[in-house]
Amino acid sequence: MPPIWAKPCATLQSQLETYFKKHAIRERLGIRVRVEEVPSRDRKPHRIQSELDIVLKSLFRIPWYTRVLLVTDSEYVQQALASHFMDAVFLPKRYGQRESTGRYIYRKDKEEMSTFLKEVSCLCECRKVINIGGFLNDGMVRTRLIHEPYDEAALLHLKRA
């Protein structure tokens, strides 16, 4: 069967088109860090400080002047990456679930999941994407993925779409 892609409604998509242009999303590197809430699952990173820091350390190899879109369910990860990258954009979130390693998106919050759908659309528009932990529709960006050690991301600012 062909893959089924989730797509925001027309109203949401028209709002996003303005956001794409305003923030030059199609010229950015999208960085998705999904933090796993269930400790027994194989997907990493989990909500464990050492695992979060390992992911951040690898992403900090990307030059600070790279224009990025940040998509994560961890306030700690978002703040750390926003502090590193001079030109980072991200959609505002509440991070309503508090744990010992910080605050996270509450996955049963309808508004937060709506924000996530917007973020997915933004990621799918980015020139290149780093995908840690996966996201809805990630198959749509398979040809634009950058993998560790992220050397290609270091040169992204030199290339034009």
Image (cartoon, grey):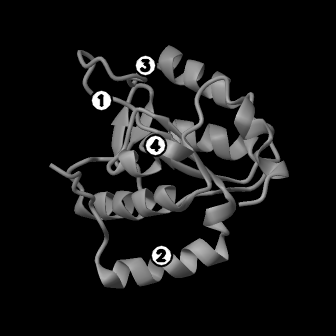
The image shows residue 99, relative to residue 73, as above or below, that is above
Per the image, label 1 sits on a secondary structure element best described as loop
- Kindly check if marks 2 and 3 are in contact, taking CB atoms under 8 A apart as contact: no
Q: Which of disc 1 and disc 4 is earlier in sequence?
A: 1
Q: Residue at x 58, y 18 (%)?
A: 54
Q: CA distance from mark 2 to mark 1?
A: 28 Å
97 lies above or below 157 = above
Mark 4 and mark 2: span between their CA atoms? 22 Å
Task: Classify 10 Å Cα crowding around label 2: few (below 14), some (14-19), many (20 and above).
Answer: some
| Residue at the disc numbered 1 | 37
Q: Where does residue 97 sit, x and y in percent of width and height?
A: 32, 42
Kind of residue at badge 2: Leu
- Read off the residue under disc 3: 48
What's the CA distance linking mark 3 and mark 1?
9 Å
Given residues 94 and 58, the one toward you in this image is 58
Residue sitting farthest toward the front: 1
Residue holding disc 2: 16
Amino acid type indicated by mark 3: Ile
The spot of residue 30 in percent (x, y) is: 58, 50
Labels 2, 1: front one: 2
Q: Residue at x 22, y 56 (%)?
A: 4
Which mark, by number, is residue 146?
A: none
Crowd band around label 4 with a 10 angstrom C-alpha radius: few (<14), some (14–19), many (20+): few
6 sits left or right of 118 in the view: left
Residue identifier under label 4 = 142
